[in-house]
Amino acid sequence: MGDATYLLETRGLVKRFGGVAAISGVDFRLKAGELRCLIGPNGAGKSTFFKMLTAQHKPSSGRILLEGRDVTHAQSHEISRLGVGIKNQVPDVFDGVSVHENIWLAARFRHRGSKAERVVEETLHRMRLEELSDSLVGELAHGQRQWVEFAMVMSLGPKLVLLDEPTAGMTVEETDRTADLIREANRTTTIVVVEHDMQFIRKIARWVTVFHQGQVLIEDTMEAIQANEQVREIYLGKSGDA
Amino acid sequence: MLEVSDLRSGYGRIPILDGVTLSIAPGEVVGILGHNGMGKTTLLRTLIGQIKATAGSILLEGREVARLAVHRRARAGMGYVPQGRDIFPQLSVRENLKMGEMAGRGENALGQVLAHFPILEELLDRPGQALSGGQQQILALARCLTADPKLILLDEPTEGIQPSIVDLIAEKLIALRQALGLTVLLVEQDLHFIQSLADRVLIIQKGRIVAEILPEQLSDRAIIDEYLGI
Amino acid sequence: MSSKVLFLGPPNQSPKWWWWCFIAVAAAVGMSVPAYTGWDVHLDLSIIFIFGMLALSMGFLWGFGGMLSFGQTAFFGLGGYTYAVWGLNFDETIFALVLAVFLPMLAAVVLGYFMIYGRISAIYFTVMTLVVTIVLEKAVRATSDERFVIGDVWLRGQNGIPNVPDLAIPWESGETFFVTGVYYVSFVLMLLSYVGLRLLLTSRFGRVLVSIRENERRSGLLGYDSRRYKLAAFIIAGGLAGLAGGMYGVWGNFVAPEMMNLNSAASVAINVIVGGKATLVGPLAGTGIVQFLTAWLGTAGVGQVNLILGLVMIACVMVFPQGVLPTLAIVATAVLARARKATMRRRKGVSGAANRGLTAGE
């Protein structure tokens, strides 16, 4: 039996591709209600880590525990059914149907008929997508499609939402709105975000985990991370002066 | 030398460059600083033509090249040293350099280039994949130069290279710059490297150039915090 | 495809009133045709309805399930042979027709399970379905020897089984459906299949199926097990193709391996492509168009009918990539939109004041 104080936990998680260890032993702990950001330079392993949490990669060794329950070998749809919402970097939405239909399909998985409809309405309102309700998702701008996908994930009423680079390809304005949406979502759901955009992370982050060369380098508040010399070095190189 | 106006591009449906405008005078070295995902590599790939621009213009010495195919831009004088070197692993050092020479205009370019990179003299017959990261970077640079380009697009030359070689490459570039009057657009994350080479530094954020600073200002923590977040 | 294309609304919505009117009118027309026409027309139309159902099974699976199957003719053949063998053995044609639906469904469960749960990629799925139908054809062809007998029925290999019994009328014992009767039965079955599938698409099952076709990964990430839905769609399509096969036996009193050969498989595909896979009515219309064209070309004395058909299909794919009907609908929508814009401009005057004009595909 696992320790149930943490919503999500990994123990000694390792992922090898051929002879190379992309993740070489990560112990990660997430409490309910957190808004956690995963950062790190290219190749640090945060995407690989994320993909293992979402069952898109199978861990080479180690364990993943969701509310104390071992989900190391679960499939993606099983993880989703356990209450984890997953949003990958490239929008995975249903292009050929409307925004409303997209969210309905998500809501309908958990609720029947009229309750599903109500959840759809609530989600459209909360995610500020009411105006776009009848639009064909395939015709929306990239940022809007990202929001639709986020709304779909939220309408499942998940305990935990995993977001991979939600602001990739977004303009600055779209990024700001995404920050608002995430903070709003955090009122009811625990959120983990993998990101590169430092400005964005500054707006939303409460606790930040920094990855480096397949391991966790440090976990702290954003202010502390920004001041940390080691972190600055891995991002900006050895600047003798700064 | 180079004038870019309101350049936009992306990968499929995902827009990355959101209107980039910049210009480079002949003989200048301009640095572009920004974190991953901000559009640095996308910018260079759009300039060289690997990614199609969806809007905007690219003027190379006054000539519009935004609609030209990659090889045409190369012949027009654009040289590209991509992230990760991209040398031909199965070909020898000499053959790699010859490929560059064939694309360019000089006949004895190979000899001239080797004069600048004596390290490669000993490695001439070694296959590309047998070289270390640093050696590959030098080879990539040399190969680019054999084509005698007017403008060099350099993408994160220090990535994955050990610090001692990084210093070597920086020195080399400074020397070459003086000797050959190179015009370079340098994309980097390493502050020190950019500082030592660039005349001006542009900060890229979410597909746009948001600031232009002097290399000295890179030592200022406040500036870094403001524009880079870290 | 624009969001507001006439008649091509997203399938998940319940059909509008005018659709029901269309069905009522179609039913009325269909049922009254025999009064004004002769047996030859009844025969010709019946086979169109029957091939239409076969095309519908493929179109449904492809357009709404996202699975391109060249093997619906395998279930078509199975259905036909099941009807023939059972009917001839037990003189029980109604149950034979029911079995003609269920036996292919059973085969679909087995075949589908291996392909879908085995996560065979799309292209291999298509190839395998084609292979299955051809292998089945070859297997049946090889049964010409006298020892290949099921019960009292000799399979007779490439000669096919003759004297397949007529379908008994359930409410008049001893009587069977003759030519006109067969017309009515095939028409009603086709209409019911069409309406049934249309309504299925508005159900939760149908909507999830479409979402899987749109983006299987996202569907999985929402929690839907895509394999179950795809297998169910495959079974339904198999059953429909089997029904068509059984009716084919009823129609011609004859079943043969040709039902499952490459030619048949190709012609189903042609019917669907010409009519368009984006709608349910597309495959039906496509079948009608192609059959009519074939008959007309035949009577016009054109020798190489297949060649012409091939050229027609190429032309269709190039000019109407989404099928004839959807393209007509899109054209109609565009024309209507322009007409509407012109009217609005005339009403409001060209003042440049806030023109909140409606455009198609907003």
Image (cartoon, helix red, strand yellow):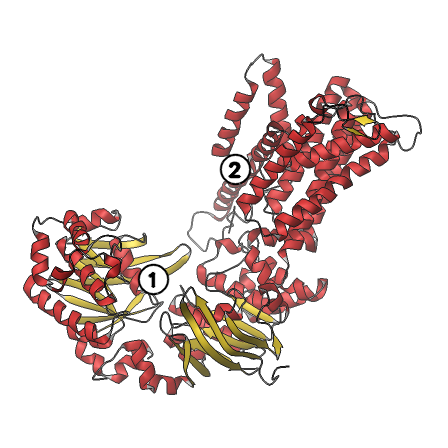
Callout 1, which amino acid?
Answer: Asp
Judging by the rendered image, the residue that carries numbered circle 2 is C331
Label pair 1/2, CB-CB below 8 angstroms: no
Q: Which mark is residue B18?
A: 1
Q: Pinpoint residue B147: horizontal percent, then vertical percent.
A: 14, 52
Q: Which mark is residue C110?
A: none
The residue sitting at 69% across, 44% down in the picture is C108
Label 1 to label 2, Cα distance in Å?
35 Å
Q: Classify C132 as above or below B205.
A: above
Q: Is the residue marked by circle 1 packed among few (<14), some (14-19), or many (20+) residues within 10 Å?
A: many
Q: Chain of mark 1?
A: B
Callout 2, which amino acid?
Answer: Val
Q: Pinpoint residue B148: horizontal percent, then vertical percent.
A: 12, 54
Q: Chain of mark 2?
A: C
Secondary structure, mark 1, is strand
Furthest residue in direction top, as rendered: C301
Secondary structure, mark 2, is helix
* Snapshot quadrant of residue C172: top right
Q: Pinpoint residue B75: horizontal percent, then vertical percent.
A: 17, 48
Query: Is the N terminus of chain B in the top left, top right, bottom left or bottom right quadrant?
Result: bottom left
Q: Classify A74 as above or below A199.
A: above
User: Are labels 1 and 2 assigned to the same chain?
Assistant: no
The residue sitting at 60% across, 85% down in the picture is A5
Q: Is residue C28 visible?
A: no
Query: B106 left or right of B221?
Result: left
In the foreground, B20 or C107:
C107
* Snapshot quadrant of residue B60: bottom left
